[in-house]
Amino acid sequence: MSSLLRGEEMCLAQLFLQSGSAYDCISELGELGLVEFRDLNPSVNAFQRKHVNEIKKCEEMERILGYLLREVKKADISLPAGDVNPVAPLPKHVMAIMEQLQRLEVELGEVTRNKEKLQRNLLELTEYTHMLRISRNFVQKTSEQEPLQVQYEEFPFLEKDKMMDYSSMQRLGAKLGFISGLIKRTKIEAFERMLWRVCKGYTILSYAEVEEYLEDPDTGDLTKSVVFLISYWGDQIGQKVKKICDCYHCHLYPYPSSNEERNDVVEGLRTRIQDLHIVLHRTEDYLKQVLIKASESVYTWVIQVKKMKAIYYILNLCSFDVTNKCLIAEVWCPVNDIPTLRRALEDGSRQSGATVPSFVNRIPTNDTPPTLIRTNKFTSGFQNIVDAYGVCNYREVNPAPFTIITFPFLFAVMFGDLGHGVIMAAFALWMVLYENDRKLKKTRNEIWNTFFEGRYIILMMGLFSIYTGLIYNDCFSKSLNIFGSGWNVTAMFKAGVWKNADIIGNRFLTLDPNVTGVFNGPYPLGIDPIWNLASNRLTFLNSYKMKMSVILGIIHMSFGVILSTYNHLHFRKKHNLYLVFLPELLFLLCLFGYLVFMIFYKWLVFTAKDSSNAPSILIHFINMFFMQGDAVQPLYPGQTGLQVFLLVIALLSVPVLLMGKPIYLYWLRNGSHRLGMYRGYERVRRNSEEELCLMRSNDMEEGSSHSDLSTSGECQTEEFDFAEEFLHQAIHTIEYCLGCVSNTASYLRLWALSLAHAQLSEVLWAMVMRVGLRMDTSLGVLFLVPVFCLFAVLTVSILLVMEGLSAFLHALRLHWVEFQNKFYSGTGVKLCPFAFSLLPSSFEQDGLL
């Protein structure tokens, strides 16, 4: 809990690694994920470092593994299930893995190329068969469709002999040529127009579509093709036709000169296609066996290569000592993990068989350490909400522990509905129960990944929404009468206030709580269900939720101001308690805390009997600033004097907040030579600037409190600039004072969104569900089924998703702006530990794993 509240205490350590055991020690540290390495060779180019050749080998193995994974995925072979986490291979085993991968790549490449070649041959033979079958009837169909009176002067007998082949034409002296082949269906129209324009009518184009789909060998997609036959006159026209066919990527095949030759070719093609099918089937079986064998080890190889590459990358960050026998590394490490770090170095040295052990040594530094906040699967989502605003400064108070409660609670105030909360909590609980399912964890859908990573946040929001739904007594816009209403209608008749004629003649009647027996006490939990029937329900709920929003907002902001004291005390800036914290708290409580006091006082003092005489809180609060307490009826005796006193205190806190800290710092740095500074309860005197600077460097630890904590622990040797400090404090004072007003008004969004959610839910019930429930015919039950389906879809899409997202964003803003800016700066640097589990993988990004 202490780590989550303030982060781990960090230190800078120096690792002395023997050359023979450095690889194993880094491997052990990568498995633990404890430390962040610093680059000790910032001026050295990445291609000039010691282990650049080893990294190139790892990249070459990654290329081969990517090829294997793509082929495995293309063959639809699943990788072995289960979490495999092999250790990084030793350097002497790298060449064996490299040779095995290269051999597998060559074998797989040869088999794949043979398969592609066989598939292309099969496709060509299939296309040739379709061309011969379809083009057989081109001349016959043409002669059948031509009218009998049309005769060609050169060949008047063509229309008479329908079965004449083209060799007969050539024997008659006609210089006819024929080009046949296949073209994609999408190109046939442009192909026909190009032939007409270029050849100027010296060609005859006949084409027909192939009935079945053919596979494109380049893309693997199924396409429709068209068989064409072109008759042309003259060799020059033939050359043009061939060039056009090449431009449109046509597949050309020789056209037989006689029917006998055609039949022989078709028979030969049929035999060759059967043989190719057999060979191709055997090739595919062998390829599948190779891929199955590769898939058994490819995931292990991917992890091993990733770890090995990361180790060499870290080794490139280290520097050698003067003897070139020892590597020196600098790391940021949590202080509590120093013993674990030592054990890891000992294990690495023992595994490598080194005679001289590696060891760690803490070194002093003035650099600001990175921030490490340990989280688990429950707290990580809430920590990500805080980190999205900014990472904590080193040892600064972390808002995440308080966000675990306040964030879902403020969300539920805006989303309060028992039914919607149950649905949301059930959905989140399902994700929590199946959180170890690999199908749910590893998907490429970013929207789903967002929901899954925040499953515990959604669960908490759903549970809190159930609670606020019970408080609002709202379940799908309907109230639940669990404990029985505290209002009694019968008492109005017994007291003689209502008559039968009143019920007949009036649509609305008013229950008077002053009549004995009408109001028997408040509802045990939440709002009384009778308010769901009242005509002034909206007016009552508006007043209740508006005041509730102001109360919650001021409590939330006051809590943020109080948290700033933990930063002031931890960073030993006690003057901020008196010159920053105290004026801020007085300004907030004397004005807006007094407003909360008036709300509670009015609720507790004024009853139903004298409620008509209760004064307006808003008028009293406005008159407080104008000091006009005598103009209206006082809320309590002595109200005017107390309001003037609180207003004076609030106004006096502004100049203290504005001038107190700059003047104190100016006096502290530019006072007399007898300057005394306090550390705890002991007065320490320093006369030299050097000693004073050293003391300040010890007192002002790294980090910052929301506006004034230094981001570096380095000694400030330059002169103190009063103007700069005063300007900084003036900006903070103006921001805080104006922010108290605007932030209090900003919390009214709790009331606004709660009202909007309740009204949308009521409108959806009235316009959809009530229509189905009011049908009293025999078809009412059948009509209710589609109505309920529509109601469920609209409820999930509008009220749960859209309204839930809106309430989530508003709760996020209330934490980032209204709450965290009271004590949190968020300008730190997050610790990036060297951990194999956190290393990104390009294969996962490409969807290969």
Image (spheres, rainbow, N blue to C red):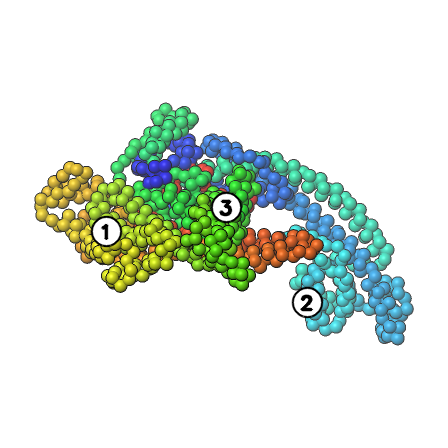
Pair 1/3: label in front = 3
Instruction: Bin the neighbour count of mark 2 within 10 Å (Cα to Cα): few under 14, some 14-19, many 20 and up.
Output: few
Kindly state the secondary structure of the residue where label 2 is placed: helix
Asked if residue 43 can be seen in this view, the reply is no
Pair 2/1: label in front = 1
Quadrant containing the N terminus in the rendered view? top left
**Residue on which the image places disc 2:** 190
> Which of the two labelled residues, at mark 2 and mark 1, occupies the earlier sequence position?
2
| Residue 484: mark | 3
| Residue 835: mark | none
What residue type is disc 2 on?
Ala
> Which of the two labelled residues, at mark 1 and mark 3, occupies the earlier sequence position?
3
Distance CA(mark 1)–CA(mark 3):
49 Å
What residue type is disc 3 on?
Gly
What residue type is disc 1 on?
Pro
Residue 47 placed where, x, y %?
40, 45
Q: Nearer the viewer, residue 393 or 241?
A: 393
Quadrant containing the C terminus in the rendered view? top right
Instruction: Give the quadrant of residue 312.
Output: top left
Q: Nearer the viewer, residue 820 or 79?
A: 820
Q: Nearer the viewer, residue 574 or 698?
A: 574
The residue located at (56%, 37%) in the rendering is 298
Kindly state the secondary structure of the residue where label 3 is placed: loop
Kindly state the secondary structure of the residue where label 1 is placed: helix
**Residue on which the image places disc 1:** 583
Marks 1 and 3 in Cβ contact (< 8 Å): no
Instruction: Bin the neighbour count of mark 3 within 10 Å (Cα to Cα): few under 14, some 14-19, many 20 and up.
Output: few
